[in-house]
Amino acid sequence: MAPMLQSRGDIQALTEEETRVMFKKTAKYMEETLQLLVDRPDSTYCFKLHKDRVYYMSEKTLKLATNISVVKLVSLGTCFGKFTKTHKFRLHVTALDYLIPYAKHKVWVKPEADQSFLYGNHFLKSGLGRITENTPRYQGVVEYSMADIPLGFGVAAKSTQDYRKVDSMAVVVFYQADIEEHARHEETLTYNEVIARTRGSGEGPCFISCACADASSC
């Protein structure tokens, strides 16, 4: 039985189990390991846990965040995802910019079907423009429009070989996240997630937000 993942309010390093769970989930989408995002030539970056959410940030941002009370700290850096109550890791769409360069498998959505996906629906074979060759079933995939605009990500319901055999109304990709989520779930997002999902990645790993009665109280 996996160890319990504790809900913590302050900024914490991920435990070994939390790191394993997160790396396993992102490995479904990335050709390379997440370690590439940590061992960067421009600066030192890290993943930290705050209120069950995993944030990606530079050490400079982390040091700045320590000047803010953890009670008032809303978010910092880029939210990569969240640990659920059942100890699973759920990737957030705010991680999309970091998945794209290393995406193993991709699908392209026809113009008439992209709106359905952006409403949070699985998409059907009839809406699939093309798919990366040799994509296995249940593989994480990044979705693009036919104009190569990233729309979100999901999980392949069929392998490349199998999807060619099914009828046009069969689900070929299970929905996971999309760039229009803020319009449907704004009440459940952190301030940073609203900014990031509305404007791409916001200010990325240098972004910190806090809840204050006035500016001087931060």
Image (tube, rainbow, N blue to C red):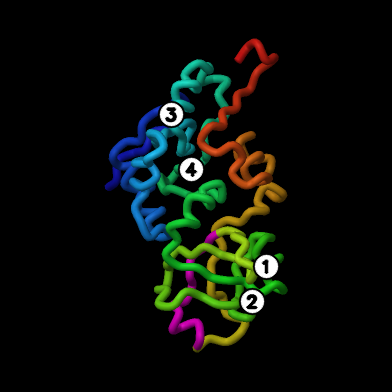
Q: Which residue is mark 4?
A: 82
| Residue assigned mark 1 | 114
Going by the numbered disc 3, the residue's amino acid type is Arg
Question: Dot 4 surroundings within 10 Å: few (below 14), some, or many (20 or more)?
Answer: many
What residue lies at 51% left-to-right and 86% top-to-bottom?
164
Image coords of residue 104 (percent x, y): 42, 64
Q: Is residue 204 visible?
A: yes
Above or below, comparing residue 131 to residue 199 in the picture = below
Secondary element under disc 1, as helix, strand or loop, is: helix
Q: CA distance from mark 1 to mark 3?
A: 38 Å
Residues at discs 2 and 1 in contact (Cβ within 8 Å): yes
| Residue extent of the magenta highlight | 153-164
Crowd band around label 1 with a 10 angstrom C-alpha radius: few (<14), some (14–19), many (20+): many
Earlier along the polypeptide chain: callout 2 or callout 3?
3
Secondary structure at badge 4 equals strand
Q: Which residue is mark 3?
A: 8
Q: Nearer the viewer, mark 2 or mark 3?
A: 2
Contact (Cβ within 8 Å) of mark 2 with mark 3: no
Image mark for residue 127: 2
- Where residue 75 appears, as percent x and y from the top left, is 55, 31
Pinpoint residue 116: horizontal percent, then vertical percent: 69, 67
Instruction: Indicate left or right for 117 with 39 as reference.
Output: right
Which marked residue is nearer to the observer: mark 1 or mark 3?
1
Q: Look at label 2 and name its amino acid.
A: Gly
